[in-house]
């Protein structure tokens, strides 16, 4: 059994090695591809969102800036050469067009503000000659200032030159523009379900986000390592994703881009769970496919190994049956392959064994048959000599002659037993079933064996059932069985004691069980199993001196079974044995 199991596992191991191992390797590499391409996707999507944002913000600011690029008609050399009414008209127009302007002024080429509209600090006309915005714009370049945060509003100063039709710079427009409407420009930029982008200025202060109420305006993020890296442009193209815990303690995938012209930065933060959703989905799907495939391979492997093992099991069962003595058994294995051939060869071998066994039985039968006449003759002559039929014999001849008689009796018994066995095995044992009153058989045998039991001071108690106890049996053979069992009960009880014989009727099944219980030496469990086989004798100190052939119980079993019954024993070492046999009553 153990070896068969191991062979099955060997097959399974080979099966798994050649099917599951490559499958696992392929699965692992496809999982790796899924994960890395998923990560690439995340990076690409983030970069797309950043580019999109940059474009929109740039457009927003450029549009504002373009409005302040003013060319006046004619060739005035300074703003003061222009009619004040016209300048007022112009500045009001510009303010309306640009919208969200909290301060706008026209600065003359000498640096003095000459027209001004302000929502906050009144309209004092200052000299701003030293201011950076004035200087930059006057030199012919657009000026984009730092973002300032005031009362919950972010403002940026934009300045540009005013030219005459000769393209000469005659003054500067400087405006403080609110970035309030920037929120609306980027608010719809999203990544997955919860990814968002936001803008910071060159100092790391928060300007605007596509996620509403993400951080308070002007919040300084320059302390955050990741933001610091972005500000100092230390962010390299890393392999894989940049994941960190953001200002609101959320684990996010981070990416960034720079708006160089304005020195702003666009940052995208995509909550990890959300970003990985697609990857996780693909991983789960791949795992599912892998699990299903492996399960199928295992099932297939089990089925295949079972198919391989099955003929081996059939063969082993057959060989077992044959070795137990069933030489009629034929191994049926129509597999159409080498196993079928092997089974046929086994069957051929069984035929040879059967032939040999028949030859042996025939030999035993002939030998026993040939021996029977001389030993019976010896028995008769010795008996006659001992009863002085050939004249009186002296005392000193009587003793050895009795020894000869004893030995010859054993020889007669052996020859009889051998003949019985040979007949039964050749199927030549003749059994004639008829109704027999077993009560008579038991009483007769008890009487016959009385001298033996008396010798050992053993009483045989047969609980007379009163009425007739009829069974279906062969009278003579039944006698043989009873002689054997009661004989053994006497033989294997050392001295003194009793033998109890009683019946048990099983009416439902029309069966009568006869029990013969002794209080003799008993036997072990392992002996009980082999007791009814040919030549088996229990080998103990107590049985060593008791003579016998080991054939009696074998013959009893053959007879009882041929009469349609069963025989068995229950025993305990030292406590005695009960031999029981059943016979049909009808
Ligand atoms: P044997 O000729 O040796 O008695 P049997 O076939 O009659 O052969 O019995 C087989 C063996 O069973 C005996 O050798 C003996 O060891 C054991 N045996 C049989 N009957 C009894 C019994 N009543 N008590 C103990 N052992 C027994």
Image (spheres, helix red, strand yellow):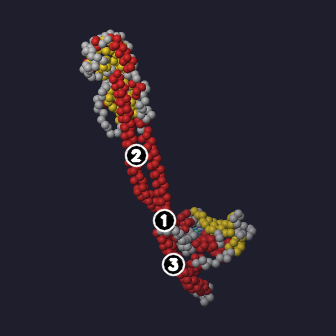
**Residue 438, position in %: x, y?**
69, 71
Bin the neighbour count of mark 2 within 10 Å (Cα to Cα): few under 14, some 14-19, many 20 and up.
some
Q: Is mark 3 within 8 Å of ligand 1?
A: no
* Picture quarter with ligand 1: bottom right
Q: Residue at x 25, y 15 (%)?
A: 77
Bin the neighbour count of mark 1 within 10 Å (Cα to Cα): few under 14, some 14-19, many 20 and up.
some
Determine the residue located farthest toward the front in the rendered image. 74
Bin the neighbour count of mark 3 within 10 Å (Cα to Cα): few under 14, some 14-19, many 20 and up.
few
**Residue 221, position in %: x, y?**
34, 26
Q: Which residue is mark 1?
A: 312
- The reply to whether residue 40 is visible in this rendering is yes
Q: Nearer the viewer, mark 2 or mark 3?
A: 2
Determine the residue located farthest toward the bottom in the rendered image. 390
- The reply to whether residue 246 is visible in this rendering is no
**Looking at the rendered structure, which numbered label has been put on residue 19?**
none
Q: Residue at x 30, y 30 (%)?
A: 229
Q: Are marks 3 and 1 in contact (CB under 8 Å)?
A: no
Q: Nearer the viewer, mark 2 or mark 1?
A: 2
Q: Does residue 34 sit above or below 450 in this rendering? A: above
Report how far apart the C-alphas of labels 2 and 1 lie in the structure: 41 Å
Report how far apart the C-alphas of labels 2 and 3 lie in the structure: 68 Å
**Residue 230, position in %: x, y?**
31, 30
Q: Are marks 2 and 3 in contact (CB under 8 Å)?
A: no
Q: Is mark 2 within 8 Å of ligand 1?
A: no
Q: Which residue is mark 3?
A: 356
**Residue 476, position in %: x, y?**
66, 77
Specify whether 437 is left or right of 394.
right
Q: Residue at x 64, y 78 (%)?
A: 430
Q: Which residue is mark 2?
A: 31
């Amino acid at each position: 059994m153990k070896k068969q199991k191991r062979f099955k596992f060997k097959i399974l191991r080979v099966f798994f090695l050649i099917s599951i191992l490559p499958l696992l390797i392929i699965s692992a590499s496809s999982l790796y591809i899924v994960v890395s391409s998923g990560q690439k996707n995340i990076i690409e999507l983030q970069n797309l969102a950043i580019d999109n944002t940059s474009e929109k913000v740039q457009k927003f600011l450029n549009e504002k800036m373009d409005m302040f690029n003013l060319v006046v008609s004619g060739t005035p050399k300074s703003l003061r050469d222009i009619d004040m009414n016209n300048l007022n008209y112009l500045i009001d127009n510009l303010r309306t067009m640009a919208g969200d302007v909290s301060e706008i002024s026209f600065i003359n080429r000498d640096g003095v503000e000459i027209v001004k509209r302000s929502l906050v600090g009144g309209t004092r006309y200052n000299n701003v000659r030293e201011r950076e915005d004035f200087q930059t714009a006057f030199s012919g370049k657009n000026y984009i200032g730092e973002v300032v945060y005031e009362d919950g509003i972010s403002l940026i100063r934009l300045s540009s030159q005013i030219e005459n039709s000769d393209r000469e710079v005659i003054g500067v427009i400087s405006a403080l523009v609110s970035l309030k409407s920037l929120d609306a420009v980027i608010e719809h930029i999203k990544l997955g379900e919860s990814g968002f982008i936001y803008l910071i200025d060159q100092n790391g202060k928060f300007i605007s986000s596509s996620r509403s109420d993400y951080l308070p305006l002007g919040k300084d993020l320059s302390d955050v390592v990741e933001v610091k890296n972005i500000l100092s442009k230390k962010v390299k193209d890393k392999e894989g994703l940049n994941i960190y815990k953001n200002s609101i303690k959320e684990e996010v995938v981070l990416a960034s881009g720079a708006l160089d012209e304005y020195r702003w930065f666009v940052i995208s933060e995509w909550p990890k769970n959300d970003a990985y959703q697609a990857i996780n989905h693909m991983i789960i799907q791949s795992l599912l496919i892998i699990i299903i495939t492996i399960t199928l391979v295992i099932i297939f492997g089990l089925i295949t190994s079972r198919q391989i093992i099955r003929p081996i099991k059939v063969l082993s069962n057959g060989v077992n049956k044959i070795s137990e003595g069933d030489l009629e058994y034929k191994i049926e294995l129509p597999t159409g392959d080498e196993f079928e051939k092997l089974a046929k060869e086994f069957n051929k071998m069984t035929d040879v064994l059967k032939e040999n066994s028949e030859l042996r039985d025939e030999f035993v039968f002939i030998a026993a048959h040939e021996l029977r006449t001389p030993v019976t003759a010896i028995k008769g002559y010795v008996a006659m000599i001992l009863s002085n039929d050939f004249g009186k014999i002296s005392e000193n001849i009587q003793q050895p002659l009795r020894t000869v008689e004893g030995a010859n009796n054993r020889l007669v018994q052996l020859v009889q037993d051998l003949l019985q066995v040979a007949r039964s095995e050749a199927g030549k044992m003749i059994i004639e079933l008829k109704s027999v009153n077993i009560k008579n058989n038991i009483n007769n045998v008890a009487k016959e064996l009385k001298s033996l039991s008396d010798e050992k001071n053993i009483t045989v108690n047969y609980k007379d059932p009163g009425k007739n106890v009829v069974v279906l049996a062969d009278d003579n053979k039944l006698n043989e069985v009873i002689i054997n069992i009661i004989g053994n009960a006497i033989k294997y009880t050392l001295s003194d004691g009793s033998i109890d014989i009683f019946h048990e009727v099983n009416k439902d099944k029309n069966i009568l069980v006869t029990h013969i219980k002794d209080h003799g030496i008993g036997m072990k469990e392992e002996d009980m199993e082999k007791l009814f086989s040919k030549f088996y004798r229990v080998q103990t100190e107590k049985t060593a001196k008791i003579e016998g052939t080991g054939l009696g119980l074998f013959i009893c079993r053959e007879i009882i079974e041929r009469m349609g019954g069963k025989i068995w024993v229950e025993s305990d070492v030292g406590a005695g044995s009960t031999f029981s046999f059943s016979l049909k009553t009808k």
